Image (tube, rainbow, N blue to C red):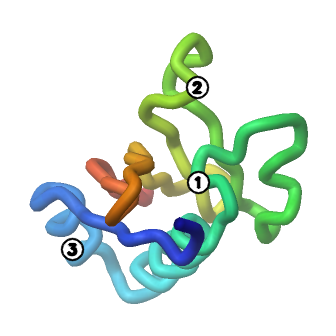
Amino acid sequence: MGPPWQDDWTTAAEADRDALPDVARDLVLAARAELVTATDPYFRGLDADRDLPSGMSVEPVQSTRPGGLHVFYFDHGRGWLRYEFTRRETDPQIVIDECFWR
């Protein structure tokens, strides 16, 4: 299986996303589009996220758990999506559990 990946939002993350102003919601949708079309949603390896648009980057929440939660920053760090990728034989998906923009 490969991109585009399925994405699922927790109720809290979805509510936070929907409460954002339109400008921020557009930024969230652009970040989501980059995430679900990435070859490797964890962006592993050196400079693996270099092809992301300006102002976007990805890093693991804990450097000791490269396969766990990750943070996708957008709008030059003003916002982020926290997510975990579950690679399965059928129906691999990205679960977004936090959406924030300031």
Q: Residue at x 46, y 73 (%)?
A: 28
Taking 65 as reference, is 83 above or below it?
Answer: below
- CA distance for labels 2 and 3: 31 Å
Q: Is residue 99 left or right of residue 57?
A: left
Mark 3 surroundings: few (<14), some (14-19) or many (≥20) residues within 10 A: few
- Label 2 crowd bin: few (<14), some (14–19), many (20+), radius 10 Å: some
Q: Is residue 98 visible?
A: yes
Q: Of label 2 and label 1, which has the lower sequence position? A: 1
Q: Is residue 64 left or right of residue 69?
A: right
**Which dot, 3 or 1, sits closer to the camera?**
1
Q: Amino acid at mark 1?
A: Pro
The three-letter code of the residue at mark 2 reads: Pro
Q: Which residue is label 3 attached to?
A: 19
Residue 66's disc is 2
The spot of residue 91 in percent (x, y) is 33, 65
Asked if residue 93 can be seen in this view, the reply is no
Residue at horizontal 30%, vertical 74%?
20
- Please say if the residues under marks 2 and 1 sit with CB atoms less than 8 Å apart: no
Q: Quadrant of residue 66?
A: top right
Q: Residue furthest top?
A: 64
Q: Kindly state the secondary structure of the residue where label 2 is placed.
A: loop
- The x, y position of residue 14, in whole percent, is 20, 67
Tags 3 and 1 touching, CB below 8 Å = no
Q: Secondary structure at mark 1?
A: loop
Q: Nearer the viewer, mark 2 or mark 3?
A: 2
Q: Label 1 crowding class (10 Å Cα cut-off): few <14, some 14-19, many 20+?
A: many
Q: Residue at x 38, y 51 (%)?
A: 88
Q: CA distance from mark 3 to mark 1?
A: 25 Å
Q: CA distance from mark 2 to mark 1?
A: 11 Å
In the rendered image, which residue does mark 1 sit on?
41
Which kind of residue does numbered mark 3 sit on?
Ala
